[in-house]
Amino acid sequence: MTQNVSEKDPQSCKIFIVDDDEQQANLMRAMAETVQLKTHLFTNSIDFLNTTINANDTVVLDLQMPDKDGIEIMRELAAQNINPNFILVSGFDERVLHSAKQLAESKNLNVVSTLSKPIKAKEFIALLSNTYEKCLDNHNQELISGLSANNTEQITIEELKLAIRKHQFIIHLQPLVSLNNKEIQSAEILLRWQHPTIGLVLPDQFIPLAEDHKLMNLLTEEILRLAINEYHNLTTSGINIKISINLSAQNITDLSMPEKLEALIKNNQIEPDSIVLEVTESALMNETSESLDILNRLRMKGFSLSIDDFGTGYSSLVKLYQAPFSELKIDQHFIIHMAADPDAAAVVRICILLARELKMHTVAEGVETEEIWNQLKELGCDIAQGSFITNPMTTEDFIPWVKNWKMEHTDNA
Ligand code: C2E
Ligand code: CA
Ligand code: CA
């Protein structure tokens, strides 16, 4: 049986409750109503899948249902590229909820939280209100920036080529800070596209397109130009830190790349040991002997090599064993969840131990809270990066930020 709310709906940020147990569904609705949140109830998953669901909607989803279970529902929505916020509910133990969440996230679905039945009213209400507010914020942000999914979907390869020619790219910087003494070790170079009509476009929206069309080598030339320029600005201001540059899969297929890079930085009076090259595990996935050849020669030339997003790629340990990485960057997914999820914390702990054995230092990215900072420090992680320290910022903001940080945190500033 399906009950739909007849009142006038807001166009977005709807809350759906999908549970075949009518009594349970009504109970959740009653809890939501205590904080004036309107819900749409579905006791039949097929009916639910026939409704229109948007990215800023919230779906409270029971995992066990007779016609189609929660996992099947998530799979079907993922296949249609529909990505609302899920709150997963189950009568099974925590482990089932946990792996359902992992499964969802592997399909890029957004699981806000998981709840075991019987549901605790206070916890449910707090979670739902919180999620709803975030959805509203998101929705408003999208309206303001005009950067809705529809807009970015319209980016074409021709536009991207033109943008490279017209130098429409800029870089933002995010510091990497020692957990031990709070000294700034490096700045990660993060690419942004200053699009003439859409505004600032984040890399996830255009790098895959550039990769698909073999444009990454051209784009990387642009990134290196911007990075070298910024490195000089920093040293001129008395800031002597490394810069971390992301390489994409395509960058490590050209056998002459190490020599080209070495020549480029030497011509610009920069030493290779000031540069950290970050390579994601997924970039090494279709690894050939070429990529190992390239990485070995980069290392021999004095560049530092960092294995990025460690723990998410494919056969991570083999990559770690074969290539001469000097730094292990634990994927932010594990860091963000480590305070609340003991399994994520276990992965972080093992990564730190592994890096220590292999004489590499560890970087944790996605450090969002003081609690996580402290936990990482306790575990012996070396370097932190994340919004707890600061979000990425423009090159203009970076130098004053560094000066201020040094004043506040370094003894001999
Ligand atoms: P990445 O290399 O893993 O970069 C870290 C991403 O995490 C950045 O997103 C950064 O803004 C974000 N981040 C930093 N701290 C936090 C935090 O505390 N919480 C959360 N939730 N996120 C945080 P961004 O700048 O959007 O970059 C996304 C990805 O795009 C990068 O992931 C990298 O793979 C790629 N990318 C960025 N710039 C370049 C580039 O110049 N070249 C290449 N090849 N790839 C790039
Ligand atoms: Ca990176
Ligand atoms: Ca990363």
Image (cartoon, grey):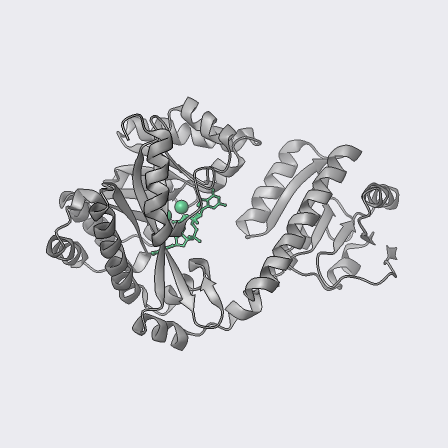
Residue 269 in the image, given as x and y percentages of width and height = 12, 51
Residue in the image at 74% along x and 56% along y: 14
Q: Can residue 63 be seen in this view?
A: no
Residue in the image at 47% along x and 72% along y: 155
Q: Please indicate whether residue 139 sits to the left or right of residue 243 in the image.
A: right
Question: Quick one: 99 or 216, which is closer to the camera?
Answer: 216
Residue 303 in the image, given as x and y percentages of width and height = 19, 45
Q: Please indicate whether residue 226 sits to the left or right of residue 82 in the image.
A: left
Q: Please indicate whether residue 242 sits to the left or right of residue 176 in the image.
A: left
Q: Is residue 402 visible?
A: yes
Q: Quadrant of the C terminus?
A: top left
Residue 91 in the image, given as x and y percentages of width and height = 75, 35
Residue in the image at 35% along x and 45% along y: 400
Q: In this picture, is 246 found above or below 311?
A: below
Residue 305 in the image, given as x and y percentages of width and height = 25, 43
Q: Would you identify the image quadrant in which residue 361 lies?
A: top left
Q: Please indicate whether residue 362 sits to the left or right of residue 149 in the image.
A: left
Question: Quick one: 104 or 377, which is closer to the camera?
Answer: 377
Q: Count all numbered tags in the image, as a single digit.
A: 0
Name of the residue lying farthest toward the top: 378
Q: In which quarter of the image is the N terminus?
A: bottom right
